[in-house]
Amino acid sequence: MTEESTNYGNEEPRNMAPEVSRTDVNDIHPCYKIDNVSYVLTSTPSTVCVLLYIFLGSLSVVTICGNILVIISIIYFKQLHTPTNYLILSLAVADLLVGFLVFPFSMEYTVSFCLYHKDLLCKVRDSIDVTLSTASILNLCCISIDRYYAVCQPLTYRTKINVHVVVIMILVSWSVSVLVAIGFLIAGLNHEKCEEKCFIDVLLANILGAIFSFYLPMIIMLCIYLKIFLVAQRQARSIQSTKSGATVSKMERKATKTLAIVMGVFLICWTPFFLCFTFQLLNNVSVPVALFETLNWLALSNSMLNPFIYAFFYSWFRSAFRIIICLKIFQGDFANTKLQ
């Protein structure tokens, strides 16, 4: 999510708009220059610019391919038709759309363009950005809730987490994401039509948006995964009398490693962006655009890593991926294949 987009940027009242110089723009992005107070692509992009777009384009391709594998696997193989995997399917759809829509839009209309020229296309990109990024985070939160019941309440898991409940969770996640995006869009449009008195409304919208998009889901996920870890350790110790100490220690290490990767990747990708956004929002300071853009792309990269985290950990997903990559699904009916 970009600085000006999602209204996660610190939009200022009109009479406080910063002056933009040729130096400012050239520092912002190597592919743009000022020509009659408008931004145009340079005729011969620099090597840095070309390498930047090749790198970002590669991230987009990997994100799309990884999430397509997850989506096809869950839809095609009947063994994967479970409530938990439906949540992973919803996450993969959100991440696929991030790679397919948000990545290319962000590459083509970078912050150096939309920061000073808020045209309709920029607003459309902003809304898509907020919706999909928030949906991805909220789906991660739903998966953590599913894992909580699976580990901490295994006897009642199948009754509490069924297809009906999962569908409701998915609908709520996407509905909240759309509402957050609409809220940002309305706040931004109102801000453009009023004076400084609207600044407080926009500030409030930004704060509430950040809370619902990141801080609240993060706190929920941290609490849930901490509880899961503690319960897993307790369960491992309770069966120590029937298993060797080495086996129990291995189980604890595996649980610790899995939970550390799940939360660690999420926090590494998203925390810097939202901390930077919150800092500049509350302190009314400007963060260097290059830094903000870097943190923005780091956050978006979470959509590329999710398929590896939530799918490659499971052997049946790896088996499904091998069958799909080898194009075996076009050679016969493998829908009922027993995935190992």
Image: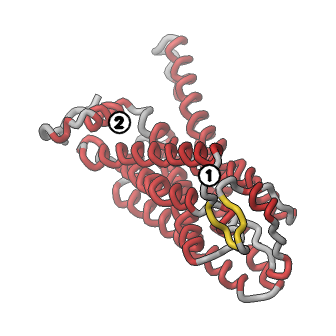
First-in-chain label (2 vs 1): 1
Tell me residue 333's x, y (percent): 13, 40
Query: Which quadrant: the N terminus?
Result: bottom right
Left or right: 239 in relation to 155:
right
Q: Relative to 94, does residue 187 appear above or below in the rendering?
A: below
Spatial separation of the CA atoms under disc 2 and disc 1: 42 Å
Q: Relative to 209, does residue 13 appear above or below in the rendering?
A: below
Secondary structure beneath disc 2?
helix
Quadrant in the rendering for residue 210: bottom right
Tell me residue 147's x, y (percent): 48, 43
Tell me residue 20's x, y (percent): 80, 68
- Return the residue found at the far bottom: 194
Secondary structure beneath disc 1?
loop
Residue plotted at (58% across, 51% down): 300
Tell me residue 26's x, y (percent): 75, 57
Crowd band around label 2 with a 10 angstrom C-alpha radius: few (<14), some (14–19), many (20+):
many
Left or right: 286 in relation to 149:
right
- Return the residue found at the far front: 43
Query: Which quadrant: the C terminus?
Result: top left
Q: Nearer the viewer, mark 2 or mark 1?
A: 1
* Residue 189 shows in this picture: yes
- In the picture of the structure, the residue carrying the numbered disc 1 is 45
Left or right: 307 in relation to 105:
left
- In the picture of the structure, the residue carrying the numbered disc 2 is 317
Q: Which mark is residue 71?
A: none
Give the residue type that dot 2 points to.
Phe
